[in-house]
Amino acid sequence: MTEELFQKMAQSILDGDADVAVGLANQAVQAGVDPLDAITKGFVLGVNQVGENFAKGEAFLPELVMAGEAMKAAVAALEPEMQRRGTSRQVFGKVVLATVEGDIHEIGKSLVGTMLGASGFQVYDLGVDVPAAKIIAKVKEVDADLVGLSALLTTTMVKQKEVIDELDKLGLRKKVKVMVGGAPVTRDWVEKIEADGYSEDAIGAVGLAKKLVGVA
Amino acid sequence: MPKNIKSITNPKLQLNILTPQEVEKIHSSTLWIIEKVGVRFPSKRALKIWADHGAKIDAEKMVVRAKPELIEKALKSCPPVYPLAARDPAQDLPLDGNHVFVGTDGCGVEVLDIQSGTRRTSCLQDVRDIARIADATEEIGFHWVPVSAQDRPPETRSLHEIQAIWENSTKHVQTESIYTEREARAAVEMAALLVGGKDKLRARPILSLMQCSASPLGHDGGSLDAALVAAEYGLPTGFMTMAANLTTGPATLAGNLAVGNAEVIAGAALIQLAFPGAPVFYAAAQTASDLRTGAYTGGGPEDFLYGAATNVLSDFYHIPLSMGSFATGAKEPNWQAGIENTLSTFMACISMSDMLLGVGLLHGSRIWSFSEMMMDCEIFSTIHKTLQGIVVDDETLALDTIAAVGSGGNFLTQKHTLKHMRDIFLPQFMDRRPYTEWETKKDDARDWALAKARKTLETHQPDPLDEGVRAEMARIIASLEKK
């Protein structure tokens, strides 16, 4: 019976159906299934399958993102039960994400957030046009392992450096890895501002994040 | 024809891409989007203008919902025809629906160095060099800021860029890199120096401003404020949508056109509500996102269709169009670049888009290549010739000459041949040499195009900017720089 439920959970992620996934999560809680089992034996298998299909060229980005969103919804539905039991999902790391101050371009950053969330990171997405001070405050508040900074303009890209300099000043630079992204970001820029890495797309960002926290 | 500038005019070829009914349907869908879904205008000034004209404002989200009547009435005051003025008045460009002009692409962040070929971060000297070559190149009618002057401070970079172009070319400048009110005001001051006062800009708009929208269904606050400054002084301004299938727009082409159209015409309507009769243009560089990475593709059948369809939309609103063509996704000048830039430009030209952006950039408008710049110009020349079509009359049927040669023989010695041989297109960069000659040299279009760019840069002396004007521009810029 539980086996069947786990299969349905994986399938709901494959289908990218958040509503079904949340329904199954609630059903599991009511049936007394350990939420961590629901995640690791159910939902995560769906995420892995979509990932494999994508790698083989059989699935496309929208399917990946929908799976990620469904996963996020399922985990959120399981969260209260995990809290009640005093357990928590093991995450690869905590990531603070933002599009830097003066820049309102959102989609790339949000895609990275969805993909990281689906891949086992705890994501704190601060949105767009975020001043360095606010990013730093969040880093300290959640004790982040990673910061992801997005910028689409060469004139706002300089704010990525500002955040890095600020982390440096506070002595947090060794502990907190910084990854940057956005259309104008180049390898030269990454070296110049001494960021820890960059990716040209959201899939690459997951690989990079895993590398930076030492799980890949 | 503007002096030393090639443009497409009176083409014989035509394309039917959207029926009048389809255009109406896209238009009414667009009005529905603006009224029911709304468009984000994150600028206090813009929101006040909308509110003053009775639009519904969601203050928290800064989303405007306007009735179709308001949009349609506002758009009626858009001037359908106006010129883009040049430092040399003989190079003014008429935006009259019967000319296609090409500009340089923008705004790249890296350059393949003209001497070494090495890829590196772009700087102000690149802006100067590209402007100088463009000044001497007949296919190029006007400038965009081709690459970002990353060795200048962010707060005045856009101003250094336009000054660098004016110093090296007499052609019109359209900047896509001014998106703050402060820089727009400074740019107006600088432009005024070239025409003898701010009150002269309306008659001689020597500068135009292009602003990117923030798809889906949004604008950038700084861009809106900058556009309103431009409009106040009669400088042409336009909003460019880059709504892309899958990511910032729906997966379907018609829906994506409607999203982009809503952004652009809502922007144009705002300008008209604030300054009725101010010159505005439609701007678009729509594409499909890559299915695997979600990245901007800069080419493909979707781009080509948008290239032709968008001018049908802008014609419907009687607004000139600045259309993204060229701008290949290829990493170097190659097969992909040739296909993408030829087809996108052909489709935009055959529907008579007024301005095309533009030549010279690779990798989705990120990396400048001088080879690509010159080869893109040749693509335009090829299309320019093709669109003239086939003229059929007594002179071109040449029956007397055909009779004189008879069966057998050849036409090489005929007077008619001598008279018309220069009608035949002569490419600069196509390899038509004997095979053995190629075999010994193994060079190709990329080498010849680069050589031409280098030679032009070495030899071309643009008409210099008045020393007093230069100094005053520098003073305006310096006054804005952080000490």
Image (cartoon, rainbow, N blue to C red):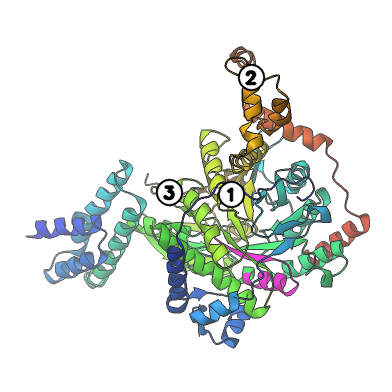
Circle 1 or circle 2, nearest the eye: 2
Q: Which residue is mark 3?
A: B290
- The disc placed on residue A197 is none
Q: Which residue is mark 2?
A: B405
Q: Are marks 2 and 3 in contact (CB under 8 Å)?
A: no
Of the pair A135 and B281, the residue shown nearer to us: B281
* Residue B427 visible in the snapshot: yes
Taking the magenta stretch, the answer to whether it contains residue A215 is: no
Q: CA distance from mark 2 to mark 3?
A: 56 Å
Q: Are marks 1 and 3 on the same chain?
A: yes
Can you give x and y, in whole percent of width and height, for residue A82 in the image? Answer: 24, 68
- The disc placed on residue B349 is 1
Q: Secondary structure at mark 2?
A: helix
Q: Earlier in the sequence, mark 1 or mark 2?
A: 1
Q: Is residue B101 left or right of residue B390?
A: right
The furthest residue to the right: B468
Of the pair B134 and A103, the residue shown nearer to us: B134
Of the pair B248 and B124, the residue shown nearer to us: B248
Q: Chain of mark 1?
A: B
Residue at x-position 41% and y-position 63% = B255
Q: CA distance from mark 1 to mark 2?
A: 38 Å
Residue at x-position 69% and y-position 37% = B113
